[in-house]
Image: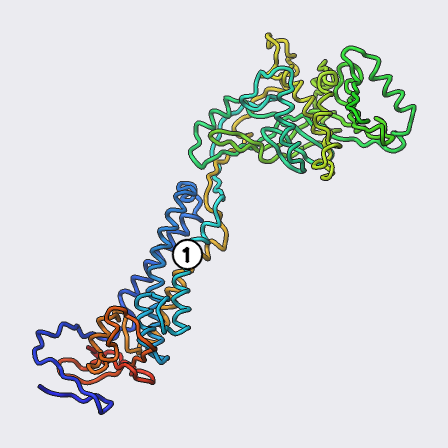
Amino acid sequence: MTTTENNLGNSTYEPLEDKDLAFGIPTKKRIFSLKDTAAIFICLSCSAVSLLSIYHQGISLYLGEANQLIIVGFLLSIMAICTNRQIALASLYYEAMHEKPTLQSFDALLRRNYMGSNIKLKVRIILLFLAALPIELSIGYKKFVNGSTISRIGGSNGKFGLIAAPGDQKTGLGFTLISDVYGPFWKSPGFPKTYGYNLLTASNTTSAILDGPFPDYVQHIQSTIATEEWVAITTDVNATVTQSHSLSEEERSDKTFWQNTYTAYLQYRFPKAWNTKDMLDGQNIGLMLSENMFNMSQAFIGIWNTTQNETFESTTERVFTSRRRCRGTWNITSTSITLSSAAILESEETALQRTNQSLIQNNLLEISNLFYLLIGEYNWRSNPRISNLRVNMAPALVNAMIWARVVSMDGPLDNISADPEAVQQEWLDSTSYTKASDEISTEKKRRTLRRHPVLGVVLVVNPFLTVVAIILKVAWYKAPVSDGFNTVAILASLHGKDASILSGAGLSGELQKPIGIGFRTESCKGASELVRVFLHEPGYSTRLSRGQVYG
């Protein structure tokens, strides 16, 4: 048996006489390994696929949000495996080359165990980062849900008109329709804002109720919609618009003005055009509408309190109603339809000159007599939630009254007359009309992850860190460890006498204090150099040479 003295001069080892019992495989230290190439390729590929699944319009629309979440989560998990391994190896290289490493720190990096004892603070921070990174990225990408992907598609001709929402047809005198259209606004008033099927509050003085798509057209679109999809249709339609025209202080105090107004409204007793009601405790409501029995274009609506020296004249709101052109966008899902955006396209003056207004100006609707008590039902002055918002509720309420009554009496689908011919043809032309496909913008939308720049950053973090870690490994390639460094490498290189230092830790794996670890190279028969591990060795380790075989 031969004995070889190491370069420290005071320790020896005895190489095996029988080479058949030595199962270690010597190798050269490679600057860049196939595993490094594979890690970069896998990370970049996974990142590219995840980015395409979100930022490519066609792929995003095809997958939908649920499938995107599954794919991105799976790819992030794969990238995390590559990234964690490369960062841990880069940390091993750094520890072996530039620090005074300890056995516990090496063991922690190999096992990704940040809970062990006697681990360097720097190493523990790295391990905590590796544990937290996949969790943070997993949480991060889920914050970008509820986005949408839009694709313009070819539509078909569609019929629009002055109708109630699908399912609300043939409801009677109009009370239900008023509640349906005005109720959402009453619960959450604001402007500019859309509500339900067809209500737009364009400003604090103007409200519009748009003509909507017919039920059979909506059902045709719904039959083409899959899960997580909806279709947006945009087109120009007619609308019933009510606008407030404020009374000046001079008009409110002008007795002649009011005398003429009352005379005009009171000369027709059937149907009653001016209705008031004492609601107790001094609260009064009043509605004047239909100054010549048929004309519903002008109305006065008021709520006043006699205990506060208020009168109808001092509190009333004057509004005018007309039919105007509007543009609306409806979002249609497989089970619902809502007005998502709208705009009034023309002024009241233009509409009065261009459009036949006889539907409102020459129609016996009995609105005041039927609906005036609804002012008490929707008393915005006695409701602190409403009054504190300073939102003008009157235009939308008068608009809802007129619209609901016209729909129930003269609408193309909803009128209560047994004879459809009872509705004048000149009104049908403006309350029921077909829009050509090229007049309707049709877009299919699907719920997807939002295309936010931060989401892109989340998806490239792993490839970036992987590449940085590999670059650092290349810079530290002379470190006396390789990508295959593990427990076997430590045992194969351990100096015989140093094993006794670890006595007592066979089951617990714990040591009483940090144990330094050093690497030295020694010459040996059968291999150009041997890498040896010495415990309790202070100082820096030997650096390896490129092209040299080590065992």
Q: Residue furthest top?
A: 419
x, y percentage for residue 398? 72, 25
Question: Mark 1 = which residue?
Answer: 135
Residue 47 in which image quadrant: bottom left
Which amino acid, mark 1? Ile
- Which residue is at 78% across, 18% downward? 275
Q: Is residue 239 left or right of residue 523?
A: right
x, y percentage for residue 273? 78, 16
Question: Residue 2 or 342: which is nearer the viewer?
Answer: 2
Q: Residue furthest front?
A: 504
Can residue 354 be seen here? The reply is: no
The C terminus is located in which quarter? Answer: bottom left
Can residue 231 be seen here? The reply is: yes
Position above or below: 3 against 188: below
Position above or below: 397 against 148: above
Q: Is residue 414 left or right of residue 296?
A: left
Residue 107 in which image quadrant: bottom left
Q: Secondary structure at mark 1?
A: helix
Position above or below: 98 against 371: below
- Which residue is at 33% across, 85% downward? 538
Question: Residue 345 or 275: which is nearer the viewer?
Answer: 275
